[in-house]
Image (cartoon, grey):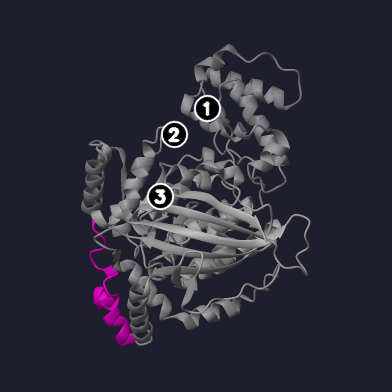
Amino acid sequence: MRCPGRPEPRRTNRRTELPAAGRACQAWTRTRSQGRRPRKPPKQAAALRLPREAEWAWARPWRGGARGVKGARRAGCGDGGGCCAGYWGRCLRRRRCGLSPPRAWAGCGLVMATEQRPFHLVVFGASGFTGQFVTEEVAREQVDPERSSRLPWAVAGRSREKLQRVLEKAALKLGRPTLSSEVGIIICDITNPASLDEMAKQATVVLNCVGPYRFYGEPVIKACIENGASCIDISGEPQFLELMQLKYHEKAADKRVYIIGSSGFDSIPADLGVIYTRNKMNGTLTAVESFLTIHSGPEGLSIHDGTWKSAIYGFGDQSNLRKLRNASNLKPVPLVGPKLKRRWPISYCRELKGYSIPFMGSDVSVVRRTQRYLYENLEESPVQYAAYVTVGGVTSLIKLMFAGLFFLFFVRFGIGRQLLIKFPWFFSFGYFSKQGPTQKQIDAASFTLTFFGQGYSQGIGTDKSKPNIKICTQVKGPEAGYVATPRAMVQAAMTLLNDVSDLPKAGGVFTPGAAFSKTKLIDRLNKHGIEFSVIGSSEV
């Protein structure tokens, strides 16, 4: 296999491509590389100076302050850094005389900063209900005053007219009348693999908003891997997420691309919240319980039925999820400290003064996969995790109990699933609807995710003694489904573009915590209204 930093051989005659100034600079560079004493750079080099944007992208690998082998390793070289150090040396020599940088193989750790693709981001499914909000969020990010470079991006979907209407709506909402002319449009269909390939070839990162992912997610991931694009989705479907990791992790690693699922409200707040809690504890964190509280305004709460459909198909296929997990043959992650006791299906949380039930989303699955990765690859102590959602008083509890019983009964049968899909508002007692929430409902809603952790202070053994330290942290943010989710997804994409040296050194299929645990994603989220904070910490 070719070393990541080794430049590809050029198959054209460079002497016929360059003018006289270029040939003089090339001869000077060749003299330097052969170890002979070179002359000064030729005066003609000034005629070939790169534009400022190109120089910035070229110089970007040195932003960490390290060159040579150390800097190459930091940038993600998969071959120990020696080859990339040589590549950087060639870059320096060519840069001094104003030439363009030598080409590197697409698997090099520098590729995300230098690869020339038309669009950094492509929002696939932009005309869908959630995709519209993701499109608006990317448009906001495009004009962020803290950005130091332009952000070329595009929207993708089946209908040019619908995509154009989405851009016009976003332009009106954001007060940017020229937005439609600034954004590319790509026509592609989930049923047409060739069109997905064309989309992936034009993108550095694809933001996939087309669900349910168990039906429509895999073709996008396959196209992205085969065409060298990374992919981020907002799936909350454990079976899809775990199956994609099992099928495509090695293929994505070979292509050096990143496939990161559950990068919305499911499950960035929970996954990074556990990592944040661990980082803030002055000792070893062993177990965490999280409690989700959803706040709504006077008009109540409503969720689009796309989420409802994903839940129906997921719960209706639980047997295949168990078979998938059994087939993976993963060794159990060791327990550190006493085993975390599971609460009853209905329990009272004294700290929050309210009733709670188990959270049925993907958070537990995602956090456990993250903890396995951190233990097996980074040798970090694994954390036990359980997730709950608060339901308020007795009235809300009774309402949710009846909705849950109806759901669990009907989801077991084919005709029952059809009824649940056809009448979401009735069977969910008004929580889900085909129209989704109104703008007033979105503006008035918010969420709080509270973490209660326990562990051991520094110097205390974890084998026999009881945990002697507790910590409480929170993640707070705006409306979960259509404000927090787009923000989390877009900031995950920006982290993927900008924090290349802090990502896992090889590509693959990752959870958000596994991919972003060493990056600045939490800082980015804090700046965009999803706030991580420590409430308190004490020794027992």
Q: Return the residue found at the far top.
A: 43
Q: As drawn, is 179 to the left or to the right of 275?
A: left
Q: As drawn, is 522 to the left or to the right of 469?
A: left
Q: Which residue is mark 3?
A: 487
Q: Which residue is mark 1?
A: 55
Sequence-first tag of 3 and 2: 2
Snapshot quadrant of residue 182: top left
CA gap, disc 3 and disc 1:
30 Å
Is 175 rendered above or below residue 56? below
Sequence-first tag of 2 and 1: 1
Disc 1 marks a residue whose amino acid type is Glu
Sequence-first tag of 3 and 1: 1
The residue shown at (71%, 34%) is 68
- Where is residue 109 shown, x and y percent of the image? 60, 44
Residue 526 visible from this viewpoint: yes
Q: Which residue is mark 2?
A: 147
- Where is residue 354 shown, x and y percent of the image? 44, 69
Name the secondary structure under disc 2.
loop
Snapshot quadrant of residue 338: bottom right
CA gap, disc 2 and disc 1:
17 Å
Snapshot quadrant of residue 431: bottom left
Marks 3,2: beta carbons within 8 A:
no
Magenta-colored span: 414-438
Which quadrant, please, contains the C terminus? Answer: bottom right
- Where is residue 287 shown, x and y percent of the image? 62, 65
Foreground residue among 375 and 211:
375
Q: Residues within 10 Å of mark 2 (few under 14, many from 20)?
A: few
Residue 126 visible from this viewpoint: no
Name the secondary structure under disc 3.
helix
Disc sitting over residue 492 in the figure: none
